[in-house]
Image: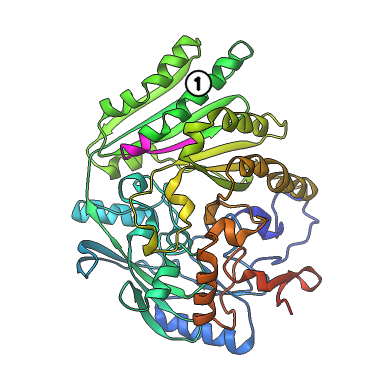
């Protein structure tokens, strides 16, 4: 969880005389095992007017999985996994049903080692699949090949705010199914299990690339960054996933991963960048390998990144901006990373246009996006004033540079600025939000489910004078 939302509770970095209190942490957690535990917990908090949160791993940039005074449904030990021969009017094929606590590495390993299959999951092995990841859209190394995680959902097993235990699919409770597939986690119902599409395994190539800037290579460095970003449409169109990191003096790709792409094809797609680096006399480190399976490649190349030292905010960058106005985009990136405060930019690059945008509530901006640009500013465990200042710089200084270049654009729910202005339209889409709000009111009219920037959250506020208590706006 992003440390800002723990309110420095029992912070080991502070002096020993500092207070140690729960702060913004939950007060109680129910170690849930099944739908009955969900139902009893929901009924208890509803009847006693207590705040509720839902949490598996706590991979959470915006504090959605915690809350002062709350009771949490803790799903982490719900690890069931089952492979199915699924049949419906819209999909026939292999599928995997998994409990709410299953994490990326667990389902990758299960699908590969026992059945030779793959499923769409996260880059980080510890991210939970069923919660906010898939419910918020969910990008990952297989997204350019098969679509976002939300595009894979076949059935949701849920407990609603009224305590009903139901299935949501394209043929049953289809409105709830639509909302759960991309409309944000912890909002419409508590998810017990999720059934997703599974695909035959495939060979995978992956590579890492790193180069740095010196005084003599300043302009050449930025030319190389530009040429690499110009190559992104070709990379994602061949089925590759790209993760890059840009600072004021370095650029790294870790990794570019191509499920179903050969080593030769991947290296050829990067040839323009290599030519530029050599022409500019910039030294670089490069490694590439072709693995017999996606799982082997994932184990070798998908190294988790520690983001607990950063505050973030993001913007989806459309393909047309890279193709038609790359100079302005590069200038905005230069302004951000050269600001002198240690800001970085990461980019997760995919092509998820494969899915029919009408079948789920994923922000339609995703379908024309080339990458999710995430701005990070340093987080200090001992200087909260600095944290507030740098978080505000993301909101009011850095993100507007990208917003100006992407009018009527959007951001990825799971990697957005928690202070995002007009979050209803930016995170969910202008046309989607009113529909999502109506579904929220249908299944949760009392607002049992709440999360920061979630659908309907504009009707609530956290009262700092009452220790962060969640209160309805009258």
Q: Quadrant of the N terminus?
A: bottom right
Q: Quadrant of the C terminus?
A: bottom right
Relative to 150, 283 lies left or right = right
Q: Nearer the viewer, residue 357 or 292?
A: 357
Q: Which residues are magenta?
A: 235-244
249 w.r.t. 259: above or below: above
Q: Visible in this render: residue 358?
A: yes
Q: Nearer the viewer, residue 381 or 144?
A: 144
Q: Which residue sits at x=68%, y=34%?
A: 342
| Numbered-mark total | 1
Relative to 14, 443 lies left or right = left
Q: Which residue sits at x=47%, y=38%?
A: 320
The residue singled out by tag 1 in the image is 224
339 w.r.t. 19: above or below: above
Q: Identify the colour scheme used.
A: rainbow
Q: Where in the figure is residue 446, as x and y percent of width and height?
A: 59, 83
Q: Where in the figure is residue 14, as x and y percent of width and height?
A: 75, 50
Q: Quadrant of residue 336?
A: top right
Q: Quadrant of residue 285?
A: top left
Q: Nearer the viewer, residue 35 or 184?
A: 184
Magenta stretch contains residue 80 = no
Q: Nearer the viewer, residue 393 or 306?
A: 393
Numbered disc 1: secondary structure: helix
Q: Which residue sits at x=27%, y=60%?
A: 197
Q: Where in the figure is residue 301, as x and y percent of width and height?
A: 38, 37
């Amino acid at each position: 969880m992003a440390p800002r939302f723990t309110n420095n509770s029992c912070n080991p970095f502070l002096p020993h005389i500092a207070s140690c209190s729960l702060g913004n942490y939950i007060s109680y957690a129910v170690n849930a095992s099944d739908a009955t535990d969900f139902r009893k917990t929901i009924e208890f908090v509803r009847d006693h007017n207590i705040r509720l949160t839902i949490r598996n791993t706590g991979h959470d940039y915006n504090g959605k999985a915690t809350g002062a005074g709350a009771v949490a449904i803790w799903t982490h030990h719900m690890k069931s996994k089952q492979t199915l021969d699924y049949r419906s009017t819209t999909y026939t094929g292999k599928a995997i049903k998994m409990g709410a606590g299953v994490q990326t590495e667990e389902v990758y390993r299960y699908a590969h080692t026992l059945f030779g299959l793959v499923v769409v999951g996260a880059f980080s092995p510890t991210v939970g699949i069923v919660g906010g990841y898939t419910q918020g859209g969910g990008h990952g190394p297989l997204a350019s090949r098969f679509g976002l995680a939300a595009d894979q959902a076949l059935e949701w097993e849920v407990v609603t705010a009224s305590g009903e235990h139901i299935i949501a699919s394209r043929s049953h409770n289809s409105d709830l199914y639509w909302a759960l597939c991309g409309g944000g986690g912890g909002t419409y119902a508590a998810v017990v299990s999720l059934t997703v599409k599974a695909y035959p395994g495939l060979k995978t190539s992956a590579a890492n690339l790193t180069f740095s800037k010196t005084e003599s290579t300043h302009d050449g460095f930025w030319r190389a960054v530009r040429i690499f970003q110009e190559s992104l449409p070709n990379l994602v169109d061949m089925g590759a996933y790209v993760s890059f990191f840009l600072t004021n003096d370095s650029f790294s790709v870790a990794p570019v991963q191509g499920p179903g792409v050969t080593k030769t094809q991947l290296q050829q797609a990067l040839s323009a960048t290599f030519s530029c680096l050599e022409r500019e006399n910039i030294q670089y480190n490069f490694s590439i390998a072709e693995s017999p399976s996606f799982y082997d490649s994932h184990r070798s190349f998908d190294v988790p990144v520690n983001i607990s030292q950063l505050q973030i905010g993001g913007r989806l960058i459309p393909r047309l901006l890279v193709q038609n106005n790359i100079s302005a985009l590069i200038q905005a990136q230069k302004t951000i990373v050269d600001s002198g405060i240690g800001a970085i930019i990461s980019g997760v690059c995919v092509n998820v246009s494969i899915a029919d945008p009408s079948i789920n509530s994923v922000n339609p901006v995703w379908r024309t996006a080339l990458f999710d640009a995430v701005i990070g500013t340093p987080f200090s465990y001992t200087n909260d004033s600095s944290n507030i200042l740098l978080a505000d710089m993301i909101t009011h200084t850095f993100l507007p540079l990208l917003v100006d270049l992407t009018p009527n654009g959007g951001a990825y729910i799971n990697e957005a600025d928690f202070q995002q202005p007009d979050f209803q339209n930016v995170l969910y889409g202008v046309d989607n939000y009113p529909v999502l709000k109506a579904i929220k009111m249908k299944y949760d009219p009392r607002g049992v489910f709440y999360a920061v920037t979630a659908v309907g959250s504009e009707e609530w506020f956290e009262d700092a004078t009452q220790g962060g208590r969640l209160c309805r706006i009258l």
